[in-house]
Image (cartoon, rainbow, N blue to C red):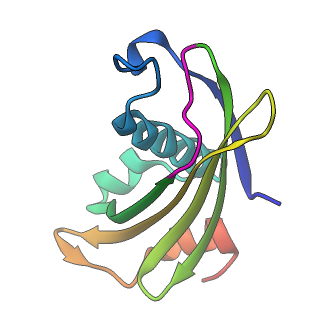
Amino acid sequence: MSDFELRMKVRDYECDLQGIVNNANYQHYLEHARHEYLLSKGISFSDLHNRGIDAVVARIRMEFKVPLRSGDEFVCTLNVKKEDVRYVFMQNIYRASDRKLCLRAKVESVCVQNGELMMGSPEMDEMLFGEH
């Protein structure tokens, strides 16, 4: 079971000469899903940034399984947990037509305040996990 799911569709310009989605575009899909998830929880990157807090990606591991092609609809799923100072997003991308796993990713994010690493954001912890 996922904390969040977002359905999207591959656009022609996201594909390379082989007719499959270029690997860099998967990062865009993952990021868009994370941003939509955070917005659904009431977390605004611009509001945090205006207060000097920035959530930034520290590490991404992606495992490519089955390529997506132009016109494919897909679902990006997301689960999040906190490990020490990191917010860890476990994300999968499935082709919608057959729920075939196309990509598995682990995205680790941290918060910095005025350029200094934070132990996390109390506001994000409260909104994501109900913790103070």
Residue at x 46% of width, y 45% of height: 31
Q: Nearer the viewer, residue 122 or 102?
A: 102
Residue 36: give x, y in percent of width and height.
58, 41
Q: Which residue is outermost to the left?
A: 115
Q: Split into 4 quadrants, where in the image is the N terminus?
A: bottom right
User: Is residue 43 covered in magenta?
Assistant: no
In the displayed structure, 85 sits above or below 93; it is below
Q: Quadrant of residue 52?
A: bottom left
Residue at 67% in and 74% down:
129
Q: Nearer the viewer, residue 132 or 40?
A: 40
Q: Residue at x 54, y 34 (%)?
A: 67
Relative to 29, say whether 54 is above or below: below
Residue farthest to the bottom, as pictured: 84
Residues 35 and 31: in front is 31
Residue 86 figure quarter: bottom left
Let me know if residue 68 is in the magenta part: yes
Q: Residue at x 61, y 48 (%)?
A: 37
Which range of residues does the magenta coloring cover? 64-70
Task: Name the image quarter holding residue 2.
Answer: bottom right
Q: Main secondary structure of the magenta part?
A: loop
Locate residue 4 relative to residue 17 in the image: left or right: right
Count of picture labels: 0
Q: What percent of the width, then of the height, locates residue 24?
A: 34, 38
Question: Please, is residue 50 above or below residue 68 in the view?
Answer: below
Q: Is residue 122 left or right of residue 51?
A: right
Q: Is residue 56 left or right of residue 19?
A: left
**Residue 94 placement, left or right of 88:** right
Q: Relative to 54, is 12 above or below?
A: above
